[in-house]
Image (cartoon, rainbow, N blue to C red):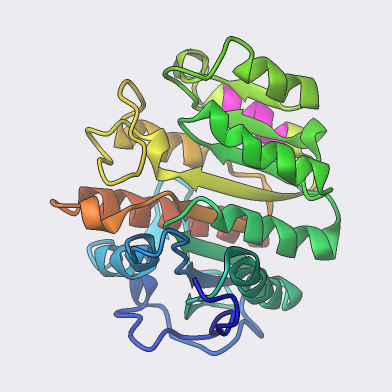
Amino acid sequence: MNPDAPSGSIGPHSDPGPSFVGLPLAGGAAGADLAVLGLAFDPTGTGGASGAPRAVRIASAALTPFYNPSQRLEVVPAQGAVDLGDVSPIGEVDRALESLSAAVAGVIGEGAVALCLGGHPAVTLAALRAGAARHGPLALVVFDAHADDGRGIRAAVADGLVDPGRSTLLGPRGGTAGPGAYDELRELGLVVFAWDELAQLGSGAVAAAVERAAGQAVLAVDLDVADPAFAPAVARPVAGGPSSAQIVALVRACRGLELVAAIVGGFAPERDVTGISALLAATLAWEVMALAAAMKAGSR
């Protein structure tokens, strides 16, 4: 990549496709309770992950988005939700992440929840930087199949973005680089519920994570947390995980989080032959909208 290239473009993508669940496209989040923002970032240069937000928006057309019976509320917040299109950064990684963080910060600065649609997992770092710049260290509640993605968590803790004592990793499974992968995160202060534990404890474990967060939080859902039978279009699939019904129920159980931002990421649309991964990502993003609507309703 050319380090002298422009670092990114902010605002609606030149071809964002349909908006997420039919929300109005807007140039800013002023007056909104929630803003959808596509973080079209692909540091590999292949362009695959950068198409994730558009694919999720297209899949969202299959949803009936107005009322969530499980949460018993209208999903679109009273003061409205908008879709800001995509941020499509180019240039070297650090400058690209600065562009992404600036876009998320623009949403948070308006008092809206930033609902970020992404492909590459690094977009979570951009959201954490934006949120922590305004609120200080944040609680992080993350669903992810990989414990070794904790390297990113450790970096975020070291940079003062994440308060590990209020943070939880849910759903890791499969092999690790060594016997201490979970223990290293626990030594930082995080709670880790491996999938074997989470499958037994269910929403009770998620409720504990919500209670532990106790303040401004970022919710991150990496699509690979789902079993590849239900979400095959991810970079690093791990068999033996939750079904789509199970992961949707677990995300619903995050009600009560004081959301600053949320990310549904880890989606590789070029691998989504049947479209079921995009549909699950869209469904999870819609469930996050319901969490934000519940939070706003409770604060009024």
Q: Quadrant of residue 34?
A: bottom right
Q: Is residue 56 magenta?
A: no
Query: Which residue appears farthest toward the left when viewing the image?
Result: 274
- Between 212 and 154, the one nearer to me in the picture: 154
Q: Residue at x 57, y 69 (%)?
A: 92
Q: Quadrant of the C terminus?
A: bottom right
Q: Is residue 174 left or right of residue 192?
A: left
Counting from the top left corner in percent of width and height, residue 230 is at: 25, 37
Of residue 259 and residue 49, the one placed in the foreground of this image is 49
Indicate whether 252 appears above or below 132: above
| Residue that lies at the very extreme toward the top in this rendered image | 179
Q: Which residues are magenta?
A: 205-211
Q: Is residue 160 left or right of residue 260?
A: right
The percent position of residue 161, horizontal first and vertical second, equals 78, 50
Q: Is residue 91 visible?
A: yes
* Vertical comparison of 250 with 43: above or below: above
Q: Nearer the viewer, residue 111 or 38?
A: 38
Q: How many marks?
A: 0
Q: Residue at x 22, y 33 (%)?
A: 229
Residue ID at (33%, 70%): 54
- In this rendering, does residue 260 appear at all? no
**Residue at the spot 50% in from the left edge and 25% down from the top edge:** 172
Compared to 103, does 246 lie above or below?
above
Could you say where residue 168 lies in the image, as x and y percent from the top left? 66, 31
Q: Main secondary structure of the magenta part?
A: helix
Left or right of 180, for residue 130: right
Q: Position of residue 279 (x, y in %)?
A: 27, 54
In the rendered image of this protein, does residue 5 appear above or below residue 113?
A: below
